[in-house]
Amino acid sequence: MKKFLKVFSNILFVISVLIIIIGTYLFYKRFYFGEFTKAQLNSEGTKFFREKESFCIENTEYNDALIYKNIPVDKNSAYRVSFSVKTEGVVGKYNEEELSENDCYKYQIGAVAGILDSTESSESVAGDSDWKEMSFIFYSKNRDEVNLCFRLGGYSGEAKGKAYFSNFKLEKAKKSDNKWNVVCFNIENID
């Protein structure tokens, strides 16, 4: 009987350890954001989680919620950030007024990526959208680091709904100078 109890307690111990390991793995897989930091304007109504290989921000109430990561950059250099985004029921609000999808685009409110504490950002995505490839370009100026953020909200407003972000990529431009090859035509009348 003592031998049976010893074997039974060992089996129970192994099962307990396996449950802890599996539980930790599942928690890590769903809620670990790596080196990204989570932030939100209002403390309630937002959930951050991972789903497969994407990060998800879900605002059940209007909020400005984001994940961001501090990224070292070379001064006076151009960078391109590319990513994928998918939205579900994203609606924006500006000055207490609910916005149409076009107005969300105009005010940069919805699912958007950008440089925190600046107006450098991608276009915003609102409503329901399948996965879209997006990108934006920023110039580092005299900064040697930036906070790259992915947000559901906006610099000047809030949003509710669900946004998924995936496939982040940061590329430094090969040539980094202030010389731009630009041509401008002003044509008043063409028949």
Image (spheres, rainbow, N blue to C red):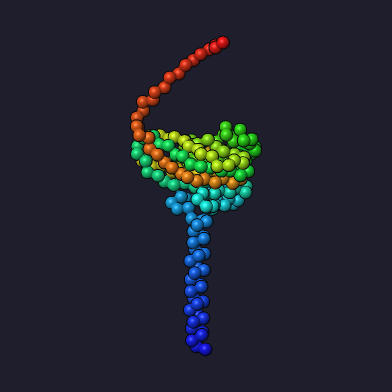
Q: Which percent across, then down, holds residue 108?
A: 55, 36
Q: Position of residue 97 (x, y in %)?
A: 65, 37
Residue 189 to residue 50: above or below: above
Q: Is residue 39 left or right of residue 62?
A: left
For residue 49, say whether it is visible: yes
Q: Residue at x 49, y 63 (%)?
A: 24
Q: Residue at x 39, y 23 (%)?
A: 181
Q: Is residue 190 above or below residue 73?
A: above
Q: Quadrant of the C terminus?
A: top right
* Residue at 54%, 49% in the rendered image: 56
**Of residues 27 and 5, which is closer to you in this image?**
5
Is residue 117 in view from this perspective? no
Residue 48: percent from left, percent from top = 54, 52
Residue under the image location 50 percent in, 50 percent down:
53
Residue 100's quadrant in the figure?
Answer: top right
Q: Is residue 3 left or right of residue 130?
A: left
Numbered-mark total: 0
The image shows residue 2 at horizontal and vertical percentages of 50, 88
